[in-house]
Image (spheres, grey):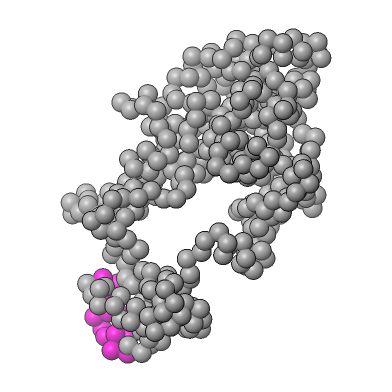
Amino acid sequence: MVGLYALLIFITLPCMNRQDTSSTHQNTSALQGMKVLELGQLIAGPFAAKTLADFGAEVIKIEPPGSGDPLRKWRMLKDGTSVWWQVQSRNKRSLALDLRTPEGQALVNKLANEADILIENFRPGALEGWGLSPEKLIEQNPKLIVLRISGYGQTGPYRNRPGFGVIGEAMGGLRHLTAEPGRVPVRVGVSIGDTLSALHGVIGILLALQHRHTTGKGQIIDVALYESVFNCMESLLPEYSAFGAIRGPAGSALPGIAPTNAYKCKDGAYALIAGNGDSIFKRLMTLIEREDFANDPSLADNTGRVARVNEIDQAIEAWTLQRNVDDVLEKLDSASVPAGRIYNIADIAADPHYAAREMLQQIQLNDGSELTIPGVVPKLSLTPGQHRRNAPMLGEDTDSILKEMGLSSVQIEALKAKGIVGSGN
């Protein structure tokens, strides 16, 4: 979610890890040496920062003293802190600093002068109001790359509107499609608009780093929530442009591609079956003993199958309803037909493939208890990402960061006395 406090990612000096959980690839991180400053909260910006941190970027997260990032208190809490926080803020350092004060803005300006990357997710104009416009920061530090994430982008008639991920999902066209026909559209159960924007932002950063590698120049990356969603909407616009077609919700099916759907089984579970490849369809029909379909020339390609999709779906479900889901999936796998069950998180946590791929990572919290969090993706053969340290307590690294900037203990205590910075709590 695009928050009130922006996201500037600044990677500074190598941090002292509070908990080093993996040392296998300490010297082979893809982004080792990158300096990133994160001035933001909640989801979109911090997710982009987390992704960079997973691959070795040294990220300083700026948080308001006293309250910190609201995500610290979102959803289920353990010892007063959200367990989500351990995912979103791993591998980061926390500097508690009040961005609304001139002294705080001066400190951020100084950090940005040494930064490689700055990411912010304030409403457009907020940075400029603090005297931290990207243009000014790049003038001072020509190598600086600035990622700006907002609801509607930095330009256009809607630029000043507040934007959250769910609004971007709706405006981007996703919400209209996520429903059963004739029923109220539902939202995806996670903040997918924020995450898509974060990933588009990371792509932009990597492109900008390559450009900087050849020119030495930084640049500004403008990511809008709705555009990140719209970019994933496949053929919606050209179909409307060419044919005036407005795709509607289709439940568990994918319109225009057949057969691909969720089919009920004897035990009440559903099997997701994607038999839409030409050769796959023939194998599927042979498996369910519908040789008439398998050998029908009119069903040999997708166009013919789409015209008879209801008939095909009924034949497949007539077969699945005679078997439990495990039996269905076993037979489909033996016939090389893509299929799977619908996982809940308990299924994921128990799945051996997730474990084998190191996607279920155990970490130890400060109180000694263990917590399982998602592993790092994507998988790189030479420079893999890793969990280097747990998410920080609010202001945990304030003193060390300010000392690295050259401030004395007396100066740091004076800033604390004024409430401009805060220590860990």
Q: Most extreme residue toward the front, as rendered?
A: 79
- Count of numbered labels shown in the rendering: 0
Residue nearer the viewer, 127 or 28: 127
Span shown in magenta: 291-306
Report the side of 285 relative to 115 (left or right): left
- Residue 81 against residue 306 in the figure, above or below: above
Question: At 37% across and 73% down in the image, what residue appears?
Answer: 263
Examine the structure image and report whether residue 301 is included in the region drawn in magenta: yes
Q: Quick check: can you spot residue 44?
A: yes
Q: x and y percent of residue 400 in the render?
A: 78, 25
Question: Is residue 389 inside the magenta stretch?
Answer: no
Q: Is residue 260 left or right of residue 99?
A: left
Q: Residue at x 77, y 41 (%)?
A: 366
Task: Say if 347 sits above or below 361 in the image.
Answer: below
Q: Nearer the viewer, residue 191 or 114?
A: 191
Specify whether residue 159 is in view.
no
- Residue 45: horizontal and vertical position, in percent? 54, 35
Q: Position of residue 380 (x, y in %)?
A: 65, 55
Residue occupying the point 77% across, 22% down: 399
Q: Please tell me in which quadrant of the rendered image residue 150 appears.
A: top left
Q: Please tell me whether the stretch drawn in magenta is mainly helix, strand or loop.
A: helix
Q: Residue at x 63, y 53 (%)?
A: 374
Please name whichever residue, 140 or 364, is drawn nearer the observer in this view of the structure.
364
Q: Nearer the viewer, residue 50 or 393?
A: 393
The answer to whether residue 178 is above or below residue 199 is: below
Q: Is 145 situated above or below 182?
A: above
Q: Residue 310 in the image: x percent, y percent?
A: 25, 73
